Amino acid sequence: MAERFGVRHASTGEIFRQAAADGSELGRTVKDYLDSGGLVPDELTSRVVEEMVVGRSDSYLLDGYPRTLRQAHDLDAMLGRRGQELDLVVCFELDDGQALRRLTGRLVCAECGENYHREFMPPQAEGVCDGCGGPLKVRSDSAEEVVRNRLAQYDEKTRPLVAYYEERGLIERVDASPAPQEVTRRTEALLSRIASR
């Protein structure tokens, strides 16, 4: 979507996973949170988003941020300091059983970071990245107990964001249960409507 609309894609998860792989100070700080399925503390996450995303670009798709009401308030403050505001919040809806099935099958290339799924998006050759030929590994945050913890965290900390953004008229819901191509089509239609404003 970011490529299609000419904006930056900013995934806090990818930023944190790359930092952990690099062994940077940020990576050492967030690694334990990632491995256990816990959320990186709000203050640290918001600081990273402001420094690495909001402070560097005017147009972006935030992926995985905000995840808590505190982070939503932090984002409001960041944007307010720049005279900006959110255009849209996409809420992908999926029941816990489907989420568990999807999240526990994720694989990632150890060399280039390309993502796969054992069932829904398998590589052409088992265990080998289609793009660079690197070895695929199970993501550390894809173990069943980690995913169950994340789903519990979502219910407690992230679900309240739906009402927060709904009250502001910013939420658009997308049923995430169909095939990825259909979810992509629906999401692209939403973003096209925003881009044409």
Image (cartoon, rainbow, N blue to C red):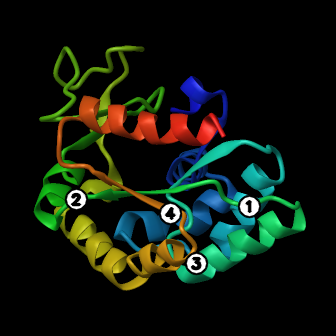
Quadrant location of residue 127?
A: top left
Callout 4: SS: helix
Label 1 sits on residue: 85
Of the image marks 4 and 3, the number of the one nearer the N terminus: 4
Amino acid of disc 2: Leu
Q: Describe residue 37's horizontal placement relative to residue 27 as left or right.
A: left
Q: Do residues under tags 2 and 4 come within 8 Å of each other at their CB atoms?
A: no
In the rendered view, tell whether residue 50 sits above or below residue 153: above
Amino acid of disc 3: Pro
Dot 3: within a 10 Å radius of its alpha carbon, few (fewer than 14), some, or many (20 or more) residues?
few
Distance of mark 2 from mark 3, alpha carbons?
25 Å
- Name the quarter where the C terminus is drawn: top right
Nearer to us of marks 2 and 4 is 2
> Could you tell me which residue is drawn at 55 percent across and 62 percent down?
65
Q: Position of residue 132 (x, y in %)?
A: 42, 14
Callout 3: SS: loop
Label 3 sits on residue: 41
Q: Do residues under tags 4 and 3 come within 8 Å of each other at their CB atoms?
A: no
Callout 2: SS: loop
